[in-house]
Amino acid sequence: MLKLKDVNLAYGPIAAVRKASIDVEAGEVVAIVGGNGAGKSTLLKGIAGLMPVSSGQIIFDGEEISRLAPHKRVARGIALSPEGRQVFPDQTVYDNLTLGAYFRRLSNDALDAEVEEQFKLFPRLRERRDQLAVTLSGGEQQMLAIARALMGKPRLLLLDEPSLGLAPKVIQEIFGIIVSLRKSGITILLVEQMANMALAIADRAYVLETGSVILSGTGQQLLHDPKVRAAYLGISHNAA
Ligand SMILES: Nc1ncnc2c1ncn2[C@@H]1O[C@H](COP(=O)(O)OP(=O)(O)OP(=O)(O)O)[C@@H](O)[C@H]1O
Ligand SMILES: [Mg+2]
């Protein structure tokens, strides 16, 4: 479904992603793990079209999208739930959700039906429908960010650090939702520093280090890889 071929992404003179080649098959959960500054968010921004590739190709459904505007990538079925949520703080939960479907030009009834679908997936958002997003807890804002991305009806969902700053119980809840989204047929590219949890649910994964893919394999292979365990899982974690 998605193929990155030797993709380079840079901030001016600073290379952030170097020659990344990554494949995502339809129906998979693919994880990208790596430490701070490894280039994970940059990679997702490149796929979403929020920053231009300096070289290399991004192919989605057999079509090269490397130079396509972000909104056209959304229209083709790619949605990003960005790092740090970035919900619109002074808009209600309902308005944040409808903005996620803005480009689809739905009737009000159709829009309400789709919002209702998100409320089924995230019941806590239903209770907070008319609350301003700024008043939500971190976990609720994360749910809103994911639900807003889903309002675009993506076939490929890019999730940037959905666990960031959340309590373990909420993280479990979010990961449960990711697993149920996969069951519903959405393909997911998941960026995470919580490498143990991401690898545990991922079909396949890539390890990024200073902008380069240094390892790849199935989630289970990487979960048990000594290098990954030492570098990203920490000795205090019992990932297995
Ligand atoms: N707007 C920017 N301008 C210049 N350099 C940037 C910018 N954003 C990121 N970088 C640099 O690009 C590199 C990759 O950053 P990126 O945010 O992609 O890392 P990350 O893997 O997502 O890290 P984290 O886990 O902390 O979110 C880092 O060296 C970072 O300093
Ligand atoms: Mg990041």
Image (cartoon, grey):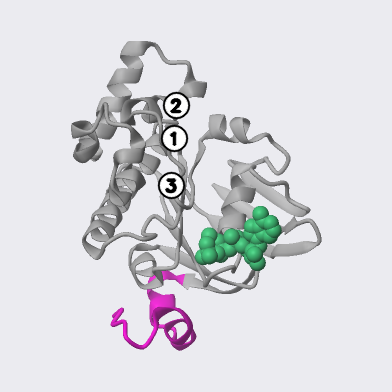
Q: Position of residue 199 (x, y in %)?
A: 39, 69
**Dot 3 and dot 2 residues touching (CB under 8 Å):** no
**Dot 1 and dot 2 residues touching (CB under 8 Å):** yes
Describe the element under mark 2 as helix, strand or loop. Answer: helix
Which amino acid, by three-letter code, is at mark 2?
Answer: Leu
Which amino acid, by three-letter code, is at mark 1?
Answer: Phe
Question: Is residue 21 visible in the rendered structure shown here?
Answer: no
Earlier in the chain: of badge 1 and badge 2, it is 1
Quarter holding the C terminus is: bottom left
Residue at 41% x, 49% y: name it. 27
Residue 131 lies in the magenta stretch? no
Question: In the visual, does 218 lie left or right of 92?
Answer: right
Residue at 55% x, 29% y: name it. 75
- In the picture, the disc for residue 99 is 2
- In the picture, the disc for residue 85 is 3
The magenta-colored residue range is 218-240
Which amino acid, by three-letter code, is at mark 3?
Answer: Arg
Question: Is residue 199 visible in the rendered structure shown here?
Answer: yes
Earlier in the chain: of badge 3 and badge 2, it is 3
